[in-house]
């Protein structure tokens, strides 16, 4: 295998591993300790686990500030800077913030959260993203799209910089290229 093909394989492995497990939700929530939350409206493209439960959304985490790119000194504040949707199983933990049974369904970010360095992609140049993850699977509506095992990372670009990101676990039968809502903020 020549060096170029080896680099592409390394990048593909990198994005596939990231898509399978972008961050530890349980540990992240233990650090945050609280947020506003409420029942989440299921999108038609969301994965639905077989266990009985509900979609639940976390927003307005204890810190509604973050940063863009790599400059952690330039603080920005946005009430809607980070939103996480999970699927909560009915039962012992359904009313608890710290729930080891919930499953990550979607993350939407308009800034980089200090406690979530794995998703610190907002504000980065598309060249940096491609250098880290390799070429996207496709580009649509100014979005770089990476997908693997019914999971997708959608990075909306403005002037070649990541404006926002969306990570989502999809229904198996969803054709991501044909679902326009995925490319909306």
Image: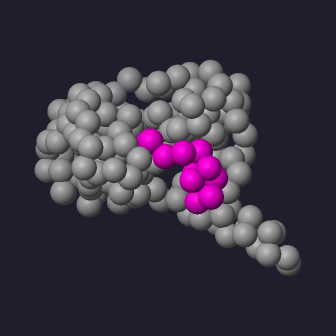
Residue at coordinates 67% horizontally, 70% vertically from top-left? 10
Would residue 115 be found to the left or right of residue 62 on screen? right
Q: Main secondary structure of the magenta part?
A: helix
Q: Position of residue 168 (x, y in %)?
A: 50, 40
Residue at coordinates 54% horizontally, 29% vertically from top-left? 158
Q: Which residues are magenta?
A: 122-133
> In the rendered view, would you say 137 is above or below 60?
below
**The stretch drawn in magenta includes residue 8:** no
Residue at coordinates 49% horizontally, 42% vertically from top-left? 167
> In the rendered view, would you say 158 is above or below 35?
above
- Tell me how the rendering is colored: one colour
Would residue 86 be found to the left or right of residue 76 on screen? right
Residue 131 shows in this picture: yes
Q: Nearer the viewer, residue 179 or 67?
A: 67
**The stretch drawn in magenta includes residue 127:** yes
> Residue furthest toward the right?
1
Residue at coordinates 18% horizontally, 57% vertically from top-left? 31
């Amino acid at each position: 295998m020549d060096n170029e093909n080896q680099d592409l394989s390394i990048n593909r492995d990198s994005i596939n591993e990231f898509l399978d497990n972008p961050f530890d939700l349980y540990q992240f929530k233990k650090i945050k300790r609280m947020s506003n939350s409420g029942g989440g409206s299921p999108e038609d493209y969301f994965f639905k686990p077989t266990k009985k439960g509900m979609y639940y959304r976390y927003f307005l985490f204890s810190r509604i500030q973050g940063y863009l790119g790599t400059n952690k000194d330039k603080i920005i504040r946005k009430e809607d800077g980070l939103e996480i949707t999970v699927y909560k199983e009915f039962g012992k933990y359904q009313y608890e913030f710290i729930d080891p049974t919930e499953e990550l369904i979607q993350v939407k970010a308009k800034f980089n959260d200090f406690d979530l360095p794995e998703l610190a992609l907002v504000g980065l140049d598309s060249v940096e993203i491609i250098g880290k993850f390799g070429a996207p699977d496709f580009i649509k509506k100014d979005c770089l799209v990476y997908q693997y095992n019914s999971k997708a990372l959608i990075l909306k670009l403005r002037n070649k910089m990541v404006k926002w990101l969306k990570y989502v676990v999809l229904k198996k039968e969803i054709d991501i290229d044909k679902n326009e809502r995925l490319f909306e903020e």
